Amino acid sequence: MSHHGAPKTQRQPTLPRSITLPGVILGLGLGGFVDGILLHQILQWHHMLSSSATANIDVGSWPVTTVHGLQMNTLWDGFFHTFTWLAVLIGLGILYSRIAGSRGRVWTSRVLWGWMLFGWGLFNVVEGVIDHHVLGIHHVVSGEFQTLADILFLVLGVLLMVGGWLLQRSGAVRPAKAADGVGPRA
């Protein structure tokens, strides 16, 4: 009891914050990098506005077969990469703050990797639905197999989300070892 007769309240420890949000944001950014680097740059299957001539919205016509069209597509690919880079930077910042503020709690790497895979799949689903189907500004590949490729991109996204969800569920969250300050490995 305190000197005023009221019971002393013990301060409740705050629960450590989850790493779900930073994992998903990291996955969104890294999934975008895979799309931009592999599909836009290395394989050159599409660019951000490569289907602009047949898009469902009027953004002008920017064919990648012309210098000016390729310049405009490269510019928008750059905006896209800026977004993905910022997502990774923000995800890392949130992850650091959550881990630094959660002394005494250790997540296995499966939890983080699971949420990152989930975020990558979420990127595929959202980007695929918006850019490929709703706006039609680009497709995974143009031509005869365009619809099939766009659907497979969505299916891959859903599979990544399910796999990521299952992987993070298999990871354990446990208290860190107090003796040496080093937590368990995963």
Image: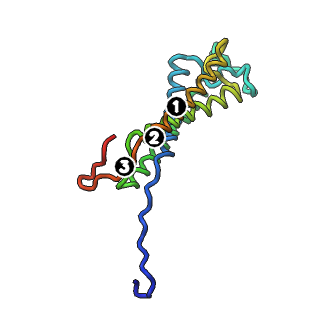
Image-quadrant location for residue 127: top right
Whether residue 41 is visible to the viewer of this picture, yes or no, is yes
Among the two numbered marks 3 and 2 on one chain, the one whose residue lies closer to the N terminus: 3
Total marks shown come to 3
Give above or below for 70 relative to 15. Answer: above
Q: Position of residue 182 (x, y in %)?
A: 28, 49
Image-quadrant location for residue 70: top right
Badge 1 is on which residue?
160
Among the two numbered marks 1 and 3 on one chain, the one whose residue lies closer to the N terminus: 3
- Three-letter amino acid code at the position of disc 1: Leu
- Three-letter amino acid code at the position of disc 2: Gln
Give above or below for 180 relative to 49. Answer: below
- Decide which of 81, 24 is in the foreground and name it: 24
The residue sitting at 62% across, 34% down in the picture is 126
- The answer to whether mark 3 and mark 2 are in CB contact below 8 A is no
Among the two numbered marks 1 and 2 on one chain, the one whose residue lies closer to the N terminus: 1
Q: Badge 2: few (under 14), some or many (20 or more) residues near its Cα, within 10 Å?
A: many
Q: Which mark is residue 106?
A: 3
Please indicate whether residue 185 sits to the left or right of residue 91 in the image. Answer: left
